[in-house]
Image (cartoon, rainbow, N blue to C red):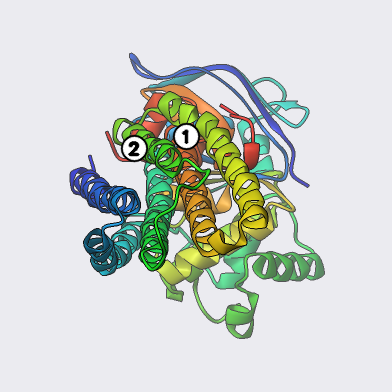
């Protein structure tokens, strides 16, 4: 029995869950900042980024140590590879939160206008994807992970709709271009959050089933 | 050239103990096949059944069919003929200690009646080259004994001795477990090269070694062949939970 090794895997999982919590909180705060235009919340998002980056390096190092020293096999090997990939995706989710907070701060310089785009709805969908993907990771549930993949099209469609509506607005009312552009970038950031959640879900399927479903691949086993 | 091995319903016993239970598998020619499993699982018994070494123990017996190429091992040939066709390398290098390096390699041929010096010289050189030992020993082939070599060199000498009689199959029972990492790497490189000429079956406790050298891997447990598949599949995503539990260290 490799008791110490399996304890180390549990510790790695716990570390990644801390990372997940921080990334999820960052994205929720950035959306709250958009909703309320509260620059103090933006500051909280900016302050959380170095901690996320630090934890990313720490998790990578722990995973690398296990690969080098324990030479894991099969489901353990897949788990560690998945952790490394999910770790990178969570760090990118943190970056998207920062990007959104930057845009919210920009928007603060302009008057608050009604834009033809439902950012809170796109945000709640993207957040739900992240939450569900992480739940699938916690429970090792490939079916739950698959349900995340199906949600990505909806987030993409909302981003496309935002592009169409905001482009039309810019043509119609060029004076609203700064606000429209910022909203467009936020919509794009949320669409990327959905992509990262999709990646996390794909990694969960790889870990649990050993099947590579990236790039719309089929589940092989 | 190597030949394929077909095993059908192979059973083996030591006294009353049933150590191999209905083994069926096909080992492809000119490939390396690794057999893994916990101690006492039957993997060494299995390879000893392939070249009829198992029956050298008076309380041991085996039943079933083993075909090496076109030859039915238990029907068509004598144990001596089978062991010429199927060479074996053991865990601990076992060169003949008082014989010179040259005589160690030539011993099998001499036993089979070869006396032509030119032929023997050629075979010794070719075998030592194939075993990646020639450059290290060519200057003292007859002046140094097999026992004077390092452990890793001795094991390569044993491989040279095994291939000198031109076998079709090489069985290796933990061939690197008594060697340091550098010697182990040399043996593994050698296995990689030798499979062009021979069919190799390697028993190993070192799973990384199995993953590195073998195209196919079989997992034995309690006398059963639990899973036999491509090495890639066995070590990344095995089909049987027992295989996964063993290779990930959850038991054994």
Question: Measured along the vertical axis of the image, is residue B20 above or below residue B144?
Answer: above
A110 on left or right of A47: right
Q: Chain of mark 1?
A: A
Q: Chain of mark 2?
A: A
- Estimate the x, y position of residue B112 in percent, counting from the top left: 70, 49
Choose between A21 and A175: the one closer to the eye.
A175
Choose between B152 and A189: the one closer to the eye.
A189
Q: Nearer the viewer, mark 1 or mark 2?
A: 2
Question: Measured along the vertical axis of the image, is residue B137 above or below residue A217?
Answer: below
Label 2 belongs to which residue? Answer: A131
Q: Are marks 1 and 2 on the same chain?
A: yes
- Crowdedness near tag 1: few (<14), some (14–19) or many (≥20) residues, C-alpha within 10 Å: many
Disc 1 secondary structure class: helix
A188 on left or right of B91: right
Q: What distance separates the C-alpha of mark 1 from that of mark 2?
A: 16 Å
- Estimate the x, y position of residue B42 in percent, counting from the top left: 41, 29
- Crowdedness near tag 2: few (<14), some (14–19) or many (≥20) residues, C-alpha within 10 Å: some
Q: Is residue B140 visible?
A: yes
Quadrant location, the C terminus of chain A: top right
A47 on left or right of B130: left
The residue at 68%/37% (across/down) is B81
Residue extending furthest toward the bottom: B139
The residue at 38%/35% (across/down) is A128
The residue at 65%/46% (across/down) is A164
- Estimate the x, y position of residue A135 in percent, counting from the top left: 32, 33
What's the mark number on residue B129?
A: none
Label 1 belongs to which residue? Answer: A205
Q: Is residue A207 visible?
A: no
The residue at 74%/53% (across/down) is B196
- Estimate the x, y position of residue A69 in percent, counting from the top left: 31, 60
Question: Measured along the vertical axis of the image, is residue B77 above or below residue A52?
Answer: above
The mark that comes first in sequence, 1 or 2, is: 2
């Amino acid at each position: 029995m490799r008791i110490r090794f399996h304890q180390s895997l549990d510790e790695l999982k716990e570390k990644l869950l801390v990372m997940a919590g921080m990334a999820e909180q960052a994205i929720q705060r950035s959306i709250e900042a958009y909703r309320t235009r509260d620059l103090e919340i933006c500051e909280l998002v900016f302050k959380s980024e170095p901690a996320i980056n630090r934890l990313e390096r720490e998790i990578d190092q722990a995973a690398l140590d296990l690969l080098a020293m324990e030479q894991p096999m099969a489901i353990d090997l897949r788990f560690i590879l998945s952790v490394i990939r999910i770790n990178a995706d969570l760090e990118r989710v943190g970056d998207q939160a920062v990007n959104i907070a930057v845009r919210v701060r920009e928007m603060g310089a302009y008057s608050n206008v009604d834009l033809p785009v439902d950012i809170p709805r796109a945000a709640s969908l993207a957040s739900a994807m992240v939450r569900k993907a992480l739940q699938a990771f916690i429970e090792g549930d490939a079916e739950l992970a698959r349900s995340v993949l199906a949600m990505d099209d909806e987030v993409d469609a909302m981003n496309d709709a935002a592009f169409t509506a905001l482009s039309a607005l810019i043509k119609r009312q060029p004076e609203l271009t700064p606000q429209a552009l910022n909203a467009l970038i936020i919509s794009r950031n949320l669409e990327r959050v959905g992509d990262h959640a999709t990646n996390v879900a794909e990694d969960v399927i790889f870990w649990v089933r050993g099947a590579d479903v990236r790039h719309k691949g089929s589940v092989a086993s | 050239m190597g030949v394929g091995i077909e095993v059908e319903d192979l059973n083996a016993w030591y006294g009353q103990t049933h150590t191999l239970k209905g083994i069926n598998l096909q080992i492809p020619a000119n490939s390396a096949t690794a057999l893994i499993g916990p101690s006492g699982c039957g993997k060494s018994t299995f390879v000893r059944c392939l070249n009829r070494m198992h029956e050298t123990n008076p309380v041991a017996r085996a039943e079933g069919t083993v075909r090496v190429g076109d030859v039915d091992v238990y029907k068509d040939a004598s144990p001596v003929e089978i062991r010429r066709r199927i060479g074996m390398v053991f865990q601990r290098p076992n060169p003949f200690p008082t014989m010179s390096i040259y005589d160690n390699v030539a011993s099998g041929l001499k036993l089979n009646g070869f006396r032509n010096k030119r032929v023997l010289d050629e075979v010794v050189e070719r075998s030592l080259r194939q075993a990646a030992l020639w450059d290290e020993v060519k200057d003292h082939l007859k002046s140094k004994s097999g026992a004077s070599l390092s452990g890793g060199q001795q094991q390569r000498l044993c491989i040279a001795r095994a291939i000198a009689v031109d076998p079709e199959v090489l069985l290796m029972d933990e061939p690197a477990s008594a060697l340091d990492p550098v010697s182990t790497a040399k043996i593994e490189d050698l296995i990689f090269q030798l499979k062009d000429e021979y069919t190799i079956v390697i028993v190993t406790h070192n799973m990384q070694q199995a993953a590195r050298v073998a195209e196919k891997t079989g997992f034995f447990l309690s006398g059963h062949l639990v899973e036999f598949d491509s090495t890639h599949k066995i070590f990344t995503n095995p089909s049987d939970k027992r295989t996964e539990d063993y290779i990930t260290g959850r038991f054994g």
